[in-house]
Amino acid sequence: MKIKQLLYFISITVLFSCNTSNKKLRIGITGLAIESSTFSPAITTEKEFDIRYGGDIFRSYPFFDQNYMDNADWFPTMRARALPGGVVSKESYESMVLQIIELTKQTLPLDGLFFDIHGAMNVEGMDDPEGDFIERIRSVIGNKTMISTSMDSHGNVSETLALNSDIITCYRKAPHTDALESKQRALDNLIERLKSVEGKPKYKAWIPVPILLPGEQTSTRVEPGKSLYEKVKPIADSKGVVDAAIWVGYAWGDAPRNHAVVMTVGDNKNAVVKGAEELAKSFWDARDEFDFVAPTTTLNDALSQAFKYLKNKKDNKPFIISDMGDNPTAGGAGDVTWTLDKLLKSKEFKSKNGPEIIYASIPGPDLIKNALNTKIGEEVSGYVGAIVDNRFSPPILLNGTLRAVHLGDKNAEAEVVVQVGSIKVIVTNKRKPYHYISDFTNLSLNPSKTDILMVKIGYLVPELYDIRGDWVMALTPGGVDQDLERLGYKNIKRPMFPLDKDMEDPDLSAVLIPVLK
């Protein structure tokens, strides 16, 4: 660990632990969060993680005001989070875990630990990284320390993770508009149980559900996901239950833990078991009803629908197309050129007077280098894409007019707009998801008024959803291909719905996980 990081950590722990009563709770905070596709050729390294130490971690949790701080002496060690991507290198995983272990040793003893993870991290040579991570944390803090685990609903809950978590929860909405609310709930539950005489919840029910679906088919905006997740809160709030959760799981990970899970925790055995089994049965019974949150089709048909929409357009709202197979927020490399190549060859976009289409986005360090030495309005060229994932299409030599330059983005580093015909291509130095209106307006683009907006994304995030005139999802190739049968799973448990559509009904009886003492 770097000396300056160690000194920073020591200063923060002193700041938050001095002049306090010995009776005050001692709570640690740590976590590693990424979803990483095993079907992408990309390798994620430590340098791609946003790593925070000590008091800097509180910036991730806006609800930590002074009143919240007063609940305990807090010992934030290290929290690392990265954009979704490929498998994490074993070296990077070990480096980060060892840092956390060493920092955690300096905080002992702890009454509680807030374990903030995603749940879909994949690491070279490992089937269950989060399970390994929490076991190693347990070996340091001991079985008596209460761990409250907060996760993404697209994460995976192995039996090992369930065993070592005393309280566990995940988001209840997709898109995840309740992310901070869920994290605060996990912390509130931890504080409440530590302050109460009951201590750890007495029962944990874990039910693996043999369903593996992408988030684009399980959104809570539409049925049956909406009704299914609406059943969670009443069960979580029922007498004798501390929390309840449904994990959809991560569809682009090929390991035995990749499947849906239901968990409940609490003090009333019957309520915990009944609640978990009710949610699991509801999930299984609805399995045939899950479908994509928007119409899905081929890229060619998506464009045909867009042109038809433009002919009959009654307002200025754009037709949005999700380029789903290479979605960087699901684990795609973000640099597959297959879709962009098709657009550039399309006769409809050859003229500058054709329908305006904004394409977001493609990494192209070579073009970026040239663009930074080019004036706005001048011609620029350079190679873009297929640096990481060239399985479907090679790099493209992009030639066009430079329209905009923006520097300093925390993900992209540098962004430019290059116009080719009527296509405005956003090129980045590093991959970046485009989720906010400001991502476009920073580049002098107006996504609300363009004709067609095409984004490497799955279901639309709220800001893009709100500006759509119409929307389809294109089944394009990439590391997070939505056609699961094309992925070629080898290691997940079988049978698994929907891969094995005619499978028999599974045993959805609750498994009671032991409470560590």
Image (tube, helix red, strand yellow):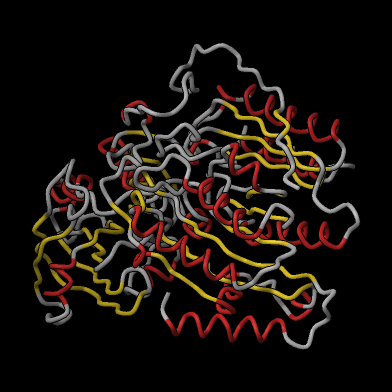
Q: Residue at x 49, y 57 (%)?
A: 33
Q: Is residue 165 left or right of residue 462?
A: right
Q: Quadrant of the N terminus?
A: bottom left
- Measuring 59% from the left and 68% from the top, which residue is drawn there? 105
Q: Left or right: 211 with respect to 168?
A: left
How far across and down, in percent of the image, does residue 415 sit?
Answer: 27, 71
Residue 378, compared with residue 306, is above or below; it is: below
Q: In the picture, residue 308 is in which quadrant?
A: top left
Query: Residue 489, how many percent across, how many down?
Result: 36, 28
Image position of 215 with respect to 465: above or below = above
Q: How many marks?
A: 0
| 316 left or right of 454 in image | right
Q: At 75% across and 81% down in the image, what residue appears?
A: 66
Residue 400 vs residue 511, the one in the foreground: 511
Asked if 100 appears above or below 372 in the picture, the reply is: above
In which quarter of the view is residue 126 placed? top left
Give residue 334's position: percent from left, percent from top.
29, 53
Q: Position of residue 468 (x, y in %)?
A: 46, 53
Note whether residue 321 is visible. no
Q: Is residue 264 visible?
A: yes
Q: Nearer the viewer, residue 275 or 145?
A: 145
Q: Nearer the viewer, residue 161 or 402?
A: 161
Q: Is residue 300 above or below residue 345?
A: above
Residue at 23% in and 46% down: 339
